[in-house]
Image (spheres, rainbow, N blue to C red):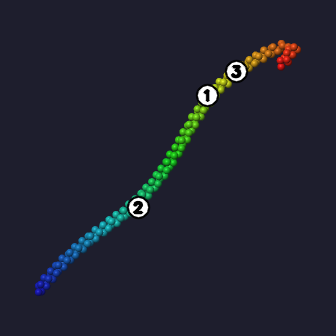
């Protein structure tokens, strides 16, 4: 029996040793798993920090994009306003061109009438000049006639009878 107790004790000791080895292996495995988990947690935390940084950058980019869109809309409104102003200016320029054409046409007509009047005035001045010369000749004739002519009493009576 003592032999059996020794065998049992030796067997228990061996099994305890094996259990200790298994426990040590499990501890080592747990330590490895724990180390791996710690590394994974650090990696996950790093990924979370990177994600937060990326989110912040994307938020900034979004805000800048919104600012850009707002600026583009403002520029589009300004461009539309400028286009409307340009259309108004073009309309005004067309009206001015039309008025200028009308003024040019009227000016040409006035110039034509002025030229005709100038020709007519020259003709009138020529006629007046001719009449003046004729009048002078008539006056000269009358003067020469009256200078030598004496009205007698009989002529005076005849003149009075005529009126």
Question: Distance from label 2 to label 1 (Cα)?
Answer: 82 Å
Which of marks 1 and 3 precedes in the sequence? Answer: 1
Is 57 positioned to the left or the right of 114 in the image?
Answer: left
Circle 2 packing at 10 Å, graded few (<14), some (14-19), many (20+), is: few
Instruction: Answer whether labels 2 and 3 touch (C-beta < 8 Å).
Output: no
Q: Which mark is residue 67?
A: none
Choose top left, top right, bottom left or bottom right for residue 35: bottom left
The residue lying toward the viewer, choosing from 85 and 6, is 85
Choose top left, top right, bottom left or bottom right for residue 154: top right
Residue that carries the numbered disc 2 in the rendered image:
56
Question: Distance from label 3 to label 1 (Cα)?
Answer: 22 Å
Residue that carries the numbered disc 1 in the rendered image:
112
Residue 159: x and y in percent read 84, 17
Residue 112: x and y in percent read 61, 28
Is 162 positioned to the left or the right of 6 in the image?
Answer: right
Is 80 drawn above or below residue 112 in the view shown? below
**2 or 1: mark nearer the eye:** 1
Q: Secondary structure at mark 1?
A: helix
Residue at 53% of width from left, 41% of height from top? 90
Residue that carries the numbered disc 3 in the rendered image:
127
**Which quadrant of the figure contains the N terminus?**
bottom left
The residue lying toward the viewer, choosing from 136 and 69, is 136
Is 130 positioned to the left or the right of 63 in the image?
Answer: right
Q: Secondary structure at mark 3?
A: helix
How many dots with numbers? 3
Which of marks 3 and 2 precedes in the sequence? Answer: 2
Is 83 drawn above or below residue 4 in the view shown? above
């Amino acid at each position: 029996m003592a032999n059996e107790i020794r065998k049992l004790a030796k067997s228990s000791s061996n099994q305890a040793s094996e259990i200790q080895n298994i426990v040590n292996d499990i501890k080592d495995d747990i330590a490895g798993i724990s180390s791996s988990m710690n590394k994974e947690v650090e990696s996950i935390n790093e990924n979370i920090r990177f994600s937060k940084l990326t989110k912040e950058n994307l938020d900034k980019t979004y805000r800048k994009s919104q600012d850009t869109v707002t600026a583009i809309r403002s520029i589009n409104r300004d461009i539309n306003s400028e286009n409307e102003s340009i259309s108004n200016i073009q309309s005004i320029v067309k009206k001015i061109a039309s008025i200028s054409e009308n003024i040019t046409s009227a000016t040409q007509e006035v110039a034509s009438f002025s030229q005709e009047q100038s020709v007519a005035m020259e003709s009138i001045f020529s006629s007046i000049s001719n009449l003046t010369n004729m009048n002078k000749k008539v006056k000269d004739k009358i003067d020469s006639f009256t200078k030598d002519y004496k009205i007698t009493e009989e002529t005076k009576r005849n003149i009075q009878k005529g009126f």
